[in-house]
Image (tube, rainbow, N blue to C red):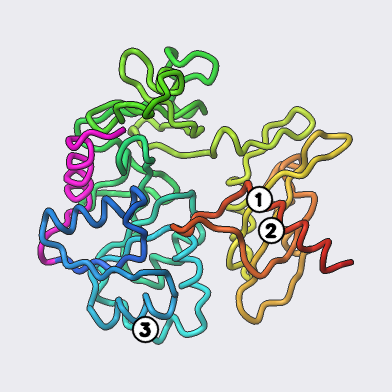
Amino acid sequence: MQSHRAVIFNGAMTAQMHAKTSADIVVSALPCPHVYGNVVFNGAMMYGVTLVLHARFDAAEVLGSIRTHRATMFEGVPTMYLYMLAHRELDRYDLSSLTRCTVGGQTMPVSKMQEVERRFGCPLIELWGMTEIAGLGTTFPCYGPHTLGSIGIALPFCETRIASVTDAAVTMPAGEVGELMIKGPIVMLGYYGNAAATHETIEPDGWLHTGDLASMDQAGQVFVVDRKKDMINTAGFKVFPAEIERVVAMHASVALVAVGSQPDALKGEIAKAYVVLKPGAAPDPQSILDLCRKELAAYKIPRAIQFVADLPKTSTGKIMRRELRKLDEEQQLIAS
């Protein structure tokens, strides 16, 4: 349940952080019922932004729209940017009108963010949010430094902290991993008809549990590690899919990657990487594993790699890790 205040306040503070005005032309393919799309839409309505809204995402159509409308911003999730980077004719589109882009909904490998900034010719500002806070909770201000790989700082009038996963009242020291918590006028009223879930999610002093594991540096910048529920337990070691995904995404032939867990008789769970190749690239699992061995501890290296045509995604384009095992079933059907 959201208050009108939370929804309007979030749209206003997001527009403030990203310096949106009536001079902006924003291209987006985010569904409006989703909080990210909702904040983009509300900000446009409130502050006179021209919004070019696509009913669905198609890399060529969106790139063409940016060029045709001389867009100053594109806002999307990581998979949208990855598809555009992999587009064969990306360099033929004039994207020089872009002054900044935003990305959220899921973590994005820094190597790919650097490629976006290089090829789009503008800053890529990361953000983080959730339905329970009516939109964004953190991002970077448009005018100021931004650190790729960080989701930024708290919105104005809001607070974030990193809490111990065993005691929410304990705040972790800078650099230590814990659960990201947020407080402020954007926090939901609660879950409708579910007082128990509301009590579990919102502490009596107003701090909301996000379910995201993260750390915070001395400057207050937040770095998401992964979702608590997505953590893979390999022989007692904690393995975070996002960390493996960031490394695999560095490989020159990889367009998209998602990492999920597989049951293992000896280790309990192992990590498996599902990889979508760039057009024309040949599958080379060994070179991907070699890269992982170079960049990751031995227990974090994926024990299997499967090349797939696409990854399961939500309506917003977020990769659904919980659906990855269905790709195993498809592979078995093909093999049979």
* Separation of marks 2 and 1 at Cα, in angstroms: 6 Å
- The residue identified by callout 1 is 259
Q: Secondary structure at mark 1?
A: strand
Q: Nearer the viewer, residue 319 or 102?
A: 319
The reply to whether residue 222 is in sight is yes
* Separation of marks 1 and 3 at Cα, in angstroms: 32 Å
Query: Quick one: quadrant of the N terminus?
Result: top left
Q: Is residue 223 left or right of residue 221?
A: right
Q: Residue 93 got which mark?
A: 3
Q: Secondary structure at mark 2?
A: strand
Residue 216 position within the rendered picture, expressed as x and y whole percent measured from the top left: 42, 31
- Residue in the image at 69% along x and 66% along y: 308
Q: Nearer the viewer, mark 1 or mark 3?
A: 1
Q: Nearer the viewer, mark 2 or mark 3?
A: 2
Q: Is residue 201 left or right of residue 299?
A: left
Q: Secondary structure at mark 3?
A: loop
- Residue in the image at 44% along x and 13% along y: 170
Q: How many marks?
A: 3
Residue 129 position within the rendered picture, expressed as x and y whole percent measured from the top left: 37, 42
Q: Which residues are magenta?
A: 1-23
- Residue in the image at 45% along x and 48% along y: 149
